[in-house]
Image: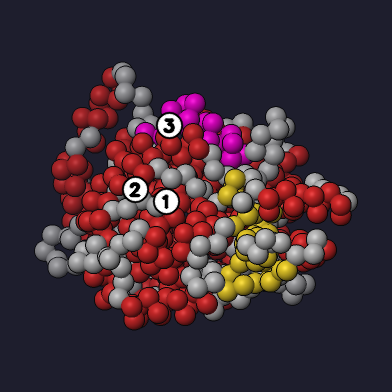
Amino acid sequence: MYSFGPRDIVGTAYAAAKIIDTLQKCEISESGVCHRTIQSLFGSDSHNRHMFQMMANVAVPLLRKFDARCLSNLTYAFATTGLNPVASGSDKSLFEHVASVSCLAAFNSQDLSNMLWAFMECGQMTPHLLESMTKECMNLLTTINLNCRNERWNTNSIHPVELGMFAISFAKAGCSSGKLFQALAEASTPLLHLFKPQELANIAYGISLSGCIPRFNDGSTFLDHMSKVIRGHLHTSAKFKPKDLCMLALWFAKAGHRDEDLFQYIAQCSISILPDFESQGLSNLAYAFALVDYTPTMPDGKSLLEHIAAHALVKNRLPAFNAQELANLVLAFATAQVPHRPLFNEVAKSAILKQNEFTPQNVSNLLWAFATAAVFNSHLFQSFTPTIEALLKECQVQFLTTIAWAFAVANVNAPSLFNSESAFINILLQRVQEFSTIDLNQLHQYCLWRKEQRSDSTLPSAVQNICYRAFLLRKPRISNFQNEVTSALRSMGLNVQEEVLLQSGYRIDAVVELHNGRNIGVEVDGPSHFMDREPSGRTILKWRQVSNLDQLKVVSVPYWKWAAICDPVTKRAYLSSLLGMIG
């Protein structure tokens, strides 16, 4: 090897890296002589490290003889293996030596994109190098004539693969240049119709990671152009892979681009290949649709989420989900207001078995989902108590308050977690100044729950007052639906007070004084109060706490029942019957 020239070194490193990568991904059949031979040569981590150490030792003294392509491929090969050895007789790593000799102006788009990815992947990107690469990429984007003849990019063009790699790598490296991502979008947009599905997904993913939404002079956005091109693939033979579909769905969802035609197309592409989705893909796909509040119906009359749930259950795939995937899956269903109880119950079983793998955010998301969907699995909540206690020092404030709120909604007491001397309460009190309004609102409902429990273990009165005042800041919103109901109640000769503030801090849509002098609370409940026409956890919590603490019985007027009644007489009869149920 010590007689190798630059191309020999690069060729050897590149081939070895590809073989090692293929072995690690288990893409070589484990049967036959070929696999055994390759395994014997490249199956040992220590052997591979030694081999790449030798290549680095030989390469470093010759780096100034490497051209741009050789430097690019060398770093790409080492980054593929995750290795960056310190060269013999030097105190610098291979990547540091490459950075010191590279003349980026000599790099074409492929060389630069490969080098950028390699430095980012190995964590060797420095602010100076990132700035230099950003400048050179901008030069390439503005000087290369990016055109296409016969649907092929010529040798002087930037290929879609490179555009995607630029976008992803610059975003992951922390590049904050909005001009760069705007230039990438402008270079890509005229030719998006020629991008393959994976190339569309990559450029979308990269620009989404940057946090930028490039806009054009005609008022359109890069999202608009991407959406149109993707929907156009419905009538072509192009096939999106599961990973590409998840990437696209998440990007559009997180950007708030609610294009129902686009998401319908993604659902149609996904439904036939759900068996090919990995566990992460299934949870991410469900979450993307939940974020845009769109659950498309498939030709068989079932929703996409129902298909995802059925696939996870029938194929018994949940045991293969990791902690984050389990939490994100139920988070998606709760966000989409789909309380699929069989799915939630099976997720609970898997989560309990894997609770030691959960991060604070995973625990918070999991318990929030179960509480919000009103799937009150007391065994799940009690089982996670030791896990929560073990993770307290890692918890962000919002995770702590969400966990407290979830236990309150589920009405599951955990004395070791919530007693006045517990670590959980002590950490909450130490971080009062960090609470957001949402945190304070959740803690107020937690404090009310402690009163429901008749527990002496609660937050100090000063903290309770802060939470109470924040809870009162919520402004009431009176809908047309509410106006209709209260008008009908008044037409019955009843005394009706609207938006009544109770001692607990809750507001009731209406308090009606019956003819016998008794007061009844009336809640006019729209779609946000329900999960598939069953009250959500948040709704149940309010009803329960108002009943227990304010001693006010509450009845609900669900939106779908009210909408089904057409004439005023029947509406008054319905209300009369509803009020008569309490008595």
Kind of residue sitting beneath label 3: Arg
Q: Which residues are magenta?
A: 304-319
Q: Of the residues under marks 1 and 3, which one precedes in the sequence? A: 3
Dominant SS in magenta: helix
Residue at x 68% of width, y 57% of height:
526
Residue 348 image point, x, y percent: 38, 40
Residue 183's place in the image compared with 1, above or below, is below
CA neighbours of label 2 inside 10 A, class few (<14), some (14 to 19), many (20+): many
Please say if the residues under marks 1 and 2 sit with CB atoms less than 8 Å apart.
yes
Residue extending furthest toward the left = 89
- Answer with left or right where residue 101 lies relative to residue 518: left
Number of the front mark, 1 or 2: 1
Number of the front mark, 2 or 3: 2
Q: 122 and 208: which one is in front?
A: 208
User: Which picture quadrant has residue 120?
Assistant: bottom left
Residue 14 in view here: no
- Reading the image, the residue beneath label 1 is 410
Secondary structure of the residue carrying tag 3 is loop
- Reading the image, the residue beneath label 3 is 317
- Reading the image, the residue beneath label 2 is 381
Residue 220's place in the image compared with 318, above or below, is below
Question: Within the magenta stretch, is there residue 305?
Answer: yes
Residue at x 54% of width, y 79% of height:
473
- Answer with left or right where residue 561 lies relative to residue 287: right
Residue at x 40% of width, y 52% of height:
411
- Answer with left or right where residue 104 lies relative to residue 65: right
